[in-house]
Image (cartoon, rainbow, N blue to C red):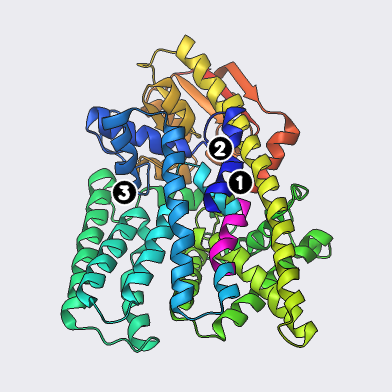
Amino acid sequence: MYVLTFTVLTTVEYAQHGLPLDDSYIHQTVARNLADRGILGFSQLHRSSGATSLLWTLIQATNYLLFRIDPVWYNLGISYVLLALIGPLLFVMASRDRLPPFVSWVVAISPALLGNFVWLGMIGMEHLLFAVFSLSAIYFWLLPPDNSLRSAVFTGCCAGLLVLTRPESIPFAPLLFLFGWAVAHQRRRLREYLVVLAFWIVCTCIQFGANLYTSKTLMPATLKGRSWLYFHNTGGPHSIRSMARFCGAWVQRLPRQFSTSYTHQLNSLREAATFYAFLGIILLVLTIVGVLFLLQRKPLRIGALVLWSGIHFSIYLFTFPTGGHGGRYQPLTLMLFFPLLVLGVYQLLSLLARGDRPWVKVAVVVFMCFASLASLGTWRRVTFAGIAHINNTHGKIATWMRANVPTTDRFAAFDIGRVSYDWGGDVIDLGGLVDPTYVDYLQTGRVIEYLKLKQVQYVLLPSTGSDDLTINPSTLGGEKVAEYCSDPGDWLLGFRYTIHATQCQTLYRVTKW
């Protein structure tokens, strides 16, 4: 089922070939630098930050070292494998929890029917890998005591690799220990805890060491710069306003799972009295009903997964409250949303029928079919719009630069992914992802001073958002040399659903230094 539904999305590649996010290409640039130059980071000239996932960088670099396959097809192949693992893992976990067969099938199949979750396989990033390692670690740790040492080794491998996949998963292994001890009443031998801890400690040290090596900070350099850009207008990442906006964005994301009609952005509680907001709240309530229905049956493994998903969501809520492009920062939330929604509908219909009547299951299956058709159709259109937008803006800018700008010229950009990958020269980042020393210039409104320090000759700016950089054509003293924009309608759909990039990209030649 996962392979089939993913293929529905992959067919867009024959009409628009590429990746649907500019950030997707940052991973490719970092991986290519590592493979071709032996330099870890985004910059071609020295080690630097730029990519959060060390393991994903190594997986991508393997392609450049050994295969040189088109990175789009390479990543689609990886996604097919990862998606093919998720369904069986969920089904085995649900079956071992002795959930009713119908509920087990709903839990296992439903993620494949949600277009937004399957879309994660299209973006060439590490989020499906995060889901697979999370599922695998929970499965192995909560196995029966037979072959307990072997299961501890597998758990340690998965928990350690999870840290190298996403750094916010560092708390996962201790939390899994606590869950096994307090909830599952699992009493493993000391050597099994030590085995898992050994893997976890080694991988955590590697993660911290890589951050120190590339950016001289324990946490990724991407965090500080993007925190300021995302939250400086809402009181910082720890403000109530930022956290409320994060929760509100997720409520708005729910109706967008099933229709392309919701391109309007709700910005305040005054707009809550709309059908869009009402539908989001209804879907949220049904999902919560599904959570309660599931947890009432005390499923050990699926319960641990739901708990880890909630904790992971909370880590972002209290430290970096944003869902990322298309909700990619919370992949477990996307994975569990549709199963829990379906179970909420199942519970509601069972209550109305005063029992688990045969027609209730039929109605639930019909609901799943219609909802999945709507969701996959919606996200196929979103995927097409995203790839087309990146091709028509960043891709065309890069093509113009290949013809007109030598790769030795000094070039800076806010959106650094596609242009760095296609142009081939070194790109100075203005988005706070790469250079830790740049963040102070960004926060104090001295980006122009930073550009002068770097003797930048060309600057690529988005059509909106450059005010945060305190840059505009007049302060830049630049001459516009190229500009490419997407059709407003197609761009708006992709932007509202995935926040891929602004409508236009404008390239300036700097003349004031």
Task: Give the Cα separation between the discs numbered 1 and 2.
Answer: 9 Å
Q: Nearer the viewer, residue 422 or 374?
A: 374
Q: Is residue 357 left or right of residue 131?
A: right
- SS category of the residue bearing label 3: helix
Question: 506 above or below 20?
Answer: above
- Magenta-highlighted residues: 106-115
Question: Is tag 1's residue or tag 2's residue first in the polypeptide sequence?
Answer: 2
Q: For residue 474, which quarter of the picture?
A: top right
User: Does the magenta segment cover residue 502?
Assistant: no
Q: Residue at x 49, y 18 (%)?
A: 512
Q: For residue 13, which quarter of the picture?
A: top right
Give the number of the mark in front: 1 or 2: 2
- In the rendered image, which residue does mark 2 sit on? 20
Asked if disc 1 and disc 2 are in contact, CB closer than 8 Å, the reply is: yes
Question: 243 above or below 381?
Answer: below
**Amino acid type of the residue that numbered disc 2 sits on in the rendered structure:** Pro
Q: Is residue 67 left or right of residue 368?
A: left
Q: Nearer the viewer, residue 229 or 50?
A: 50
- SS category of the residue bearing label 1: helix
